[in-house]
Image (cartoon, grey):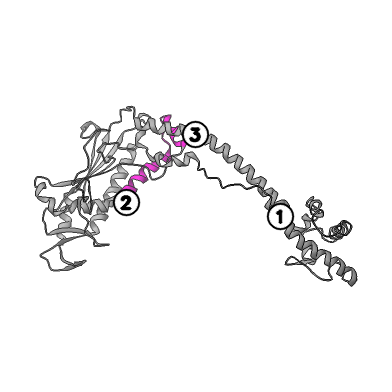
């Protein structure tokens, strides 16, 4: 069983904002950020020294997210220290994985209500048991059950798993919050204020854009309205000046259409697919129907061209390129830890102590993908990493 211990603030093993030095081959740090950004209302609450229920839940869920996302990867690699580095680590027994520590080694911690600690402890125990239930021990030289990984043959060495599990420790450190000033918090609040000022300009520009868009749409709609409305609109006064139909005949045609087409459903009695239906205006008078049928044909054809000309005169409205300034700063609104000045609660930091394998012939792998992850360095040897 994995040992999980709550280290109380009075033990002072670690302190909030303490520098524990940079990452090494035996240390991996993860600075804590919320998975979802705080809203400005959430931040307003925090500045009043109040943390709402939603923010508390965000914090807890984000801690679990970190465990789900990073635990397997770093537990595996920090157990499988690259064999070439083992001669320099003879006096060490454990590697460490920290949540709540920056890459530079600053303990920024995780603000958490103390009544959530017991639940966190239980969830961590479940996650660790799931992890150890889903890994295999491998030996390069001896064993009875062969396990093929890539081009290499290993042997089952599962008795190793219980040994590793027994010596794995999780420490939940309670860090006293002294409410000291935090420059990161000041910088964040300044950026919020700048964004709010920019937002005023943004909304002013957006409203101008919306007015222009409405103007453009209204203009388009004026020439694109339903036929039963179009024939009664003032567009007909403009169209009279364009059409080749004589003014008298045009006015007569409009009167006929007004009498016969009063609503939308009436249109289909006289037009189909934008064309006049023969014998629909005057079914019992062939000569009159042919005459006004021809005017209808001219009307319909010429209106298409007239409409194209008129629409081409409409204003051009360029796409609105701006993004709400508040949305631009959403990524930095995930930093809950920097508000220590305003939070009347202590912080935590999670430290997982992982026994690493010193036998050059032994590894562990996930049962799922059977990929050997190791802890080593980048090619330039400047930064420890999983390889």
Q: Residue at x 27, y 51 (%)?
A: 71
Q: Position of residue 259 (x, y in %)?
A: 86, 59
User: x, y percentage for residue 258?
Assistant: 84, 57
Image height of 160 relative to 279, above or below: above
Q: Quadrant of the C terminus?
A: bottom left
Given residues 44 and 207, the one toward you in this image is: 207
For the residues marked 1 and 2, what is the alpha-carbon distance in whole angstroms? Answer: 59 Å
Provide the secondary structure element on which disc 3 rests.
helix
Q: Position of residue 6 (x, y in %)?
A: 24, 40
Query: Quick check: can you spot residue 192?
Result: yes
Residue 60: in magenta span: yes
Q: Is residue 221 left or right of residue 372?
A: right
* Residue 157 visible to an observer of this rendering: no
1 vs 2, front mark: 1
3D distance between C-alphas at marks 3 and 2: 34 Å
Magenta stretch bounds: 40-68
Residue carrying label 1: 309
Q: Identify the residue under disc 2.
A: 69
What number is the disc on residue 196? 3
Tell me which numbered mark, 3 or 2, is placed earlier along the sequence.
Answer: 2
Disc 1 residue crowd, few under 14, some 14–19, many 20+, Cα 10 Å = few
User: Which residue is at a point 37% across and 37% down the rendered structure image?
Assistant: 336
Against 187, residue 270 (above or below) is below
Secondary element type, mark 1: helix
Q: Nearer the viewer, residue 128 or 104?
A: 104
């Amino acid at each position: 069983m994995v040992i999980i211990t709550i280290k109380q603030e009075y033990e002072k093993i670690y302190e909030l904002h303490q520098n524990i030095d940079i990452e090494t081959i035996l240390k991996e740090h993860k600075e804590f950020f919320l998975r979802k950004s705080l809203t400005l209302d959430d931040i307003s609450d925090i500045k009043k020294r109040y943390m709402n229920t939603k923010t508390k839940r965000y914090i807890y869920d984000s801690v679990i997210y970190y465990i789900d996302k990073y635990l397997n990867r770093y537990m595996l690699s920090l157990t499988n220290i690259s064999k070439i580095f083992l001669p320099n680590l003879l006096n060490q027994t454990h590697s460490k994985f920290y949540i709540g520590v920056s890459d530079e080694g600053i303990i920024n911690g995780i603000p958490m209500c103390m009544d959530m600690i017991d639940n966190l402890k239980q969830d961590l125990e479940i996650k660790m048991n799931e992890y150890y239930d889903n890994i295999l021990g491998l030996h390069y030289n001896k064993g009875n059950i062969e396990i093929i990984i890539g081009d290499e043959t290993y042997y089952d060495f599962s008795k190793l798993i219980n040994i590793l599990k027994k010596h794995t420790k999780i420490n939940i450190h309670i860090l006293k919050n002294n409410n000291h000033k935090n420059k990161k918090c000041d910088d964040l609040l300044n950026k919020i204020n700048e964004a709010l000022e920019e937002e005023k300009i943004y909304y002013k520009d957006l409203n101008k854009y919306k007015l222009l868009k409405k103007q453009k749409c209204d203009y388009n709609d004026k020439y694109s309205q339903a036929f039963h409305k179009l024939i009664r609109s003032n567009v007909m006064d403009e169209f009279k000046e364009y059409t080749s139909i004589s003014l008298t005949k045009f006015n007569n045609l409009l009167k006929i259409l007004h009498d016969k087409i009063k609503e939308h459903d009436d249109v289909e009695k006289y037009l189909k697919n934008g064309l006049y239906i023969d014998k629909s205006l005057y079914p019992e008078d062939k000569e009159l129907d042919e005459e006004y049928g021809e005017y209808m044909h001219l009307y319909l054809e010429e209106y298409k061209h007239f409409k194209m000309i008129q629409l081409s005169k409409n204003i051009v409205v360029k796409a609105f390129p701006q993004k709400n300034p508040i949305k631009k700063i959403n990524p930095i609104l995930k930093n809950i830890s920097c508000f220590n000045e305003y939070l009347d609660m202590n912080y935590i930091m999670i430290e997982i102590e992982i026994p690493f394998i010193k036998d050059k012939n032994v590894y562990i792998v996930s049962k799922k993908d059977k990929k050997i992850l190791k802890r080593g360095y980048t090619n330039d040897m400047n930064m420890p990493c999983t390889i």
